[in-house]
Amino acid sequence: MFRIGIIGSDNSHAEIFAKLCNLKDKDTQEYAFPDCRVVGIYGHDKYRTEEVAKNAQIEFIAQDPREFMGKVDAVMVVFRHGDLHKEYALPFIEAGIPTWIDKPFTIKNSDAREILEVAKKHKTLVTGGSTCKYAEDILMAKNIVEGQDEIGKVKTAVISFTTNFENEYGGIYFYGAHLVEMALEIFGYDVKSVTSSKSKDCVTAILKYSDYQVTLNFVEDLMEYNLIIIGEKGTIVRNIDISNVYKLGFERFVNMLRTKKQPYPLENIYSSVKVFNSLVESYKENLSIQVPGN
């Protein structure tokens, strides 16, 4: 049995992940992940933490995340604010404990880079970021782009997704990470530069690749999400269904524990953080920004 500790109760993801693990499926009356249990939770807000523990049948509430040491086989760091993630994740990564770090993985490039380096040094399995990149529509689009059989070589593409600019969790970083990670999963992580601008309800960003550009629309409170991929032989227009992504993402995490293999390159997550920061810098400075290297 893999014992999992959750760090950060403010995020709805804490309760969603814990319920996926701890509660039986309503239809099958079976556990979706019978070899896993969320056995403990830590959070800043006492009442919210108690609420999540009650709703998801989590037995142990830690007063300090260090109490998880020796009691868990893995942790999930799911605080809403990405600036908290490095602080709470590093002690477990340094201890060799497999770690999930939720979106936004980090806000600062330097935080993501440090996590990557510490994980490599201690040979610790680390994954996370947005679960939306595992949506079936995203993986379908990725296969089309990579295969080129259906639409030929890509000429350009547009993806539109919801966001929220005004919040206490880092502004656009809190929700915008979904769109950045979905786009990079489809079109690749070698973005050369980013040019973006901001209006009242939307940030539009152009990701420059070697052979084409991809436009991202971060739209305040958008209700439907879609992508358009234009190729030499045809065009794909598709809505993006994210209704099952929590389970799909959690499956990647559990499979990492089972196989002891990294499910998703950490370098890709680091690239996502760098692209996102270049995007924000671009609209703030009104400049086209080169995505930095290591």
Image (cartoon, helix red, strand yellow):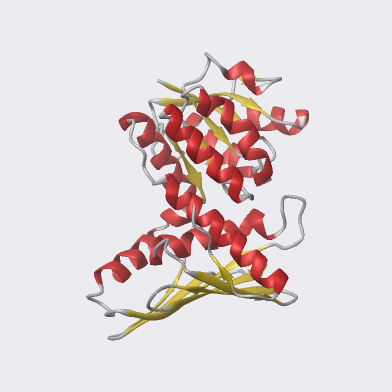
Q: Residue placed at 38% from the left, 30% from the top?
A: 257
Query: Which quadrant of the view contains residue 122?
Result: top left
Does any portion of residue 147 appear in the rendered image?
yes
Q: Is residue 269 left or right of residue 46?
A: left
93 shown above or below 72: below
Q: Residue placed at 47% from the left, 61% from the top?
A: 182
Q: Position of residue 76 (x, y in %)?
A: 54, 34
Q: Position of residue 293 (x, y in %)?
A: 49, 57
Farthest-out residue, bottom: 233
Query: Which quadrant of the view contains residue 137?
Result: bottom left
24 shown above or below 40: below
Q: Residue placed at 50% from the left, 29% from the top?
A: 22
Does any portion of residue 56 appear in the rendered image?
no
105 shown above or below 253: below
Q: Position of residue 56 (x, y in %)?
A: 58, 31
Farthest-out residue, top: 70
Q: Is residue 207 left or right of residue 148?
A: right
Q: Nearer the viewer, residue 250 or 215?
A: 215
Q: Position of residue 224 (x, y in %)?
A: 56, 70
The quarter of the rendered structure image containing the N terminus is top left
Q: Is residue 193 left or right of residue 164?
A: left
Q: Nearer the viewer, residue 279 or 103?
A: 279
Q: Residue placed at 33% from the left, 35% from the top?
A: 261
Please tell me how many numbered marks the rendered image carries. Answer: 0
